[in-house]
Image (cartoon, helix red, strand yellow):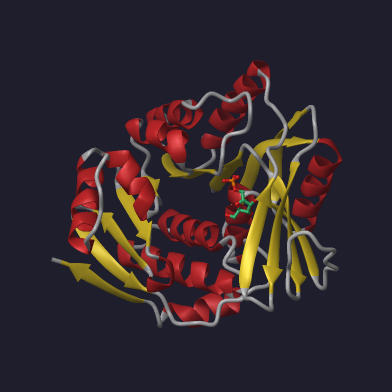
Amino acid sequence: MITTVTLNAAIDKTYYTGRFELGTVTRVGEMISMPGGKGINVARVVRLLGGSVIASGFVGGFNGEYMVSELGKQGINADFVRVEGESRLCLNIIDTYNRVSTELLEQGPAISPEQALEMKDKIADLAAKSSIVVLSGSLPKGVSVSFYAELTAELNRLGVKVFVDTSGDALLEAVKAKPFFIKPNEHEVEKLLGKRIEHESELHACIRELLASGISCVAVSLGEAGSIAGYGGELFRIRAPRIEAVNTVGCGDSFVAGMALALSNNEPIEECLRLATASGTANALMPGAGVVDPDTVHSLLEHVQISKID
Ligand code: TA6
């Protein structure tokens, strides 16, 4: 089983508008509302692709109750810690006239030290039934910047593969505990290693350095161009199929979902990267965030190109 952890869960609302202008009234056309936040998106995509998954994290208030009830309707097992305050809303405004999207992400509720401890215990319990635990998204207020690092160290001790998909100081701390998988962008790689990347060869060297530090798998997204990944001392260039994107929010989460699912099924690394890329690409074809059509994922698989980098 795969466990996903979303410490700052959200209701993701995607608004489709015509021309979106600041300082005026905009009436929304289509609106899509779904439980979200990075780990919940991962859980939904794993489930849609037929995997066994449980979603955990913190939820609060009416929004939290709504999320848990919607997850149930989507067939996703949920085991959250309840907190005071209201789980956040994350808005993605897609201006179909200018073809740009604008995200507004609320802060979310603060977490008490007791609730943080409760979460650690819950994750340790869930880890006993899981081969992979995915720690995704920003840290809520009240949670220590080393929280993912502490969880990673404990989960490593329990023999569970840890995926960490976060940014900033939380990522800087987490990598010190050697998660199995990370998915930084180029800018985050620069921050992690204190280096500037100007040429692709420098990115290759940085990925090799992260692998040598004890992280088993590193995937760096290059946007539409695909990604470069490292595993087992080897580097891979992955080219994603060309598509006309509708909504790119949640593509990274879908990539993580495909990666985790294929790995939990003991697929070879190339097949993990193939499912990850097909899932991320399929997400971009959907109007909502963190959702895929499984048939589309399967039809995209053969169009993902993977080659080894010497
Ligand atoms: O990756 C997309 C997304 O998961 C959205 O669904 C939105 O909820 C947001 O990211 C949250 O990101 P954060 O880093 O604040 O946890």
Residue 200, quarter of picture: bottom left
Taking the image as shown, residue 26 lies to the left or right of residue 91, namely: right
**Where residue 202 sits in the image (x, y, percent)?**
19, 55
Residue extending farthest to the top is: 114
Q: Nearer the viewer, residue 91 or 134?
A: 91
Q: Nearer the viewer, residue 277 or 247?
A: 247
- Number of numbered tags placed on the structure image: 0
Image point (80%, 72%), residue name: 30
Q: Tell me if I can see residue 169 in this picture.
A: yes
Is residue 44 shown above or below 99? Answer: above
Q: Tell me if I can see residue 291 in this picture.
A: no
Taking the image as shown, residue 301 lies to the left or right of residue 210, namely: right
Image point (57%, 67%), residue name: 248
Is residue 181 shown above or below 177? Answer: below
Image point (41%, 75%), residue name: 240
Image point (43%, 80%), residue name: 241
Residue 275, quarter of picture: bottom left
**Where residue 125 sits in the image (x, y, percent)?**
58, 30
Is residue 139 shown above or below 115? Answer: below
Q: Nearer the viewer, residue 167 or 268?
A: 167
**Where residue 263 sits in the image (x, y, percent)?**
41, 56
Residue extending farthest to the left is: 310
- Quarter holding the C terminus is bottom left
**Where residue 175 sits in the image (x, y, percent)?**
36, 36
